[in-house]
Amino acid sequence: MFSFQSIHQYHSFLDKNENGCSIAVDHYLHEIEKKQHLNAFLEVFAEEAMERAKALDQKRKSGKPIGRLHGVVVGIKDVICYKDHTVSAGSKILENFKSIYHASVVEKLLQEDAIIIGRQNCDEFAMGSSNENSAFGAVRNALDEARVPGGSSGGSAVSVQAGLTMISLGSDTGGSVRQPADFCGVVGLKPSYGRISRYGLIAYASSFDQIGIFSNTVQDAALCLEVISGSDDFDSTVSEKPVPAYAAELTTAPRKYRIAYFKQALEHPGLDPEMRATISELIAQLRQEGHIVDPIEFDLLNHIVPTYYVLTTAEASSNLSRFDAVRFGYRAPLVNPALNDMYKASRSAGFGKEVQRRIMLGTFVLSAGYFDAYFTKAQQVRRILLNKSVDVFEKYEAIISPTVPSTAFKIGEKSDDQVAMFLADIYTVFANLVGIPAISIPLFKHSNGLPFGLQIMTNHFEETTMLQLSDQLMN
Ligand code: GLN
C-alpha cells in the first residue's frame, strides 16, 4: 500500500517504481473519495491528475531530467487561479468563474512537475478563522469531525492532515495558513511579504496577503518554498532577492539561538492556561539547552487585532469592488435594469454575510470624516509595530509565541460572536502587519486530545533561520 512521509522518501519510492506517480495519484483519489464528508475539496481534477501522473512516469522512464517537485500531489486553495479551472474564492458570486490564466505559483509548481489534484474549500474570499464562512459548507477537522479545522485555508490544512494531498497551498492575510495548521496538527508557513508572487491570487487585503504552504514536515515546506518563491514580472511587490536553497540549508548542524517572546502575549488572559504552561516549559527547556530566551515588553498587544481589521477591511472594500456583476461573476435577474439596482441586487445575493460586513466596515473606515480617525490611525500603529520588530530583531533572531490562544473549537460554537472570533487572531496578525515570515509547527498536544502549535517569526527574508530553528525543534 502507498504511504507518504516526505517528498524525499516519496522520491526514493519513485526510483524503485516506474509507475510510482500513478500509484500515488490513484491512492489520493481513493482517499479523497473516502473522506468526502470532510468537505475539504470543492473540486477534484481526477482525470487530468491521473493523465499527468502517467505522463510523469513516462518522463522518468525516458531518462529526461525531472523537476524538484516531480509527482508531488498538491491541492490549491480556491483563491489561486489555475487556467481553465473554476476558481470561486468560496463564494456564490464566483461560483461559475473560470480562470483564464495561471497564478505564478501554479506555473512554478507545474514547471517542477507537481500534480495539482484539486481546489480546496475555504472561507469566502479568505475572510474567516473557521471555514464556516464558505458558501459551500463548513470543512470538518479530521481529528474530531464536530470541530472546525480553522480558517480561512481550512480545506488545504485538512487535506494534509487527513492524507488527501502531500502538500497544499493556502493564503495567509492574518493567519489563514498558520491558524488552521495549528488546529490540524500540521506545518503551516507564511513567508515574508514579497517572497512569493501574488499574481493570480484573488486579493483580500493586498498589503497583507501572502501565499503559504501546508506540509507534514519542515523539509517539505522548505522545498516547496524554494520552488514557488522569487521575482515575477507580473507582481511588482515581489522582491528581487535571490531565493536560497531552503531545503539544502536544513542540513546544517543544530546550534543555539537568540530568541525573544512577548511577555504580554504569554500572560494574556485569553490564552488557554494549559497552553501557557506548555510554552513556558518549552522556554525553560530551551534555556537549559543553552539558547537565549528573553521576555520582551509589548504594550501594543491589544491594539494589533483592531489595527488589522481596520486596514484589511479597508483594502478588502476596495479590492472586492471589482465584483460588480459586469466584469465578473453572478448577476441577479432584474425587473428594473437600472445600473445601481443591478449592482445592489447582484452583490447582495452573491456575497455572504461576513464578506458584506467587511465591505461595509472597510467603506466606513475609508469614508470622509472617519478616514483620519480610523485608517490613518491604524497606519500609524502599523508603523510603530514595524519599528518594534526592527528593535527586537536587532538583538534576537526569532520571536516565539503560541499560534492561537485555544485549540480547535466546535462547529457553530463561535459563529454568533464575531468579536471573539476576531480576537483569536491575536498572535498571527503581527507577522502580516509588519510583513515578516512566520510558521506554525505542530509541537504540542493538549490534554483535550487536540494538537496545537508553536509560532516562530523571524526578520524580513530570514526564512532560512526560521526553517532551521523549526526543523531543530521538530526533531
Ligand atoms: N482570520 C483572519 C481574517 O478573518 C485571517 C484571514 C486570512 O489570513 N486570510 O481576516
Image (cartoon, rainbow, N blue to C red):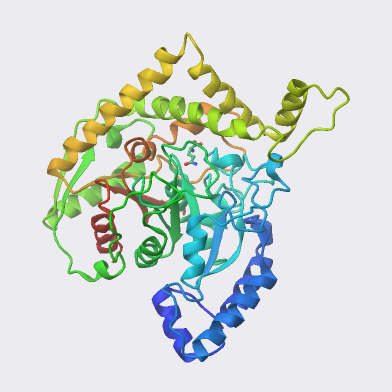
The reply to whether residue 143 is visible in this rendering is no
> Compared to 115, does 141 lie above or below?
above
Which quadrant does the N terminus fall into? Answer: bottom right
Residue at 39% in and 26% down: 307
Q: Position of residue 55 (x, y in %)?
A: 59, 81
Which residue is the extreme one toward the right? 335
Which residue is the extreme one toward the top? 369
Which residue is the extreme one toward the front? 233
> Compared to 397, does 160 lie above or below?
below
Left or right of 179, for residue 54: right
The reply to whether residue 397 is visible in this rendering is yes
Residue at 48% in and 58% down: 105
Q: Position of residue 68 (x, y in %)?
A: 41, 73
Left or right of 114, for residue 9: left
Residue at 53% in and 50% down: 200
Q: Position of residue 441 (x, y in %)?
A: 36, 55
Residue at 58% in and 53% down: 81
Which quadrant does the C terminus fall into? Answer: bottom left
Q: Position of residue 460 (x, y in %)?
A: 26, 46
Which quadrant of the figure has residue 89?
A: top right
Q: How many marks?
A: 0
Left or right of 414, for residue 234: left
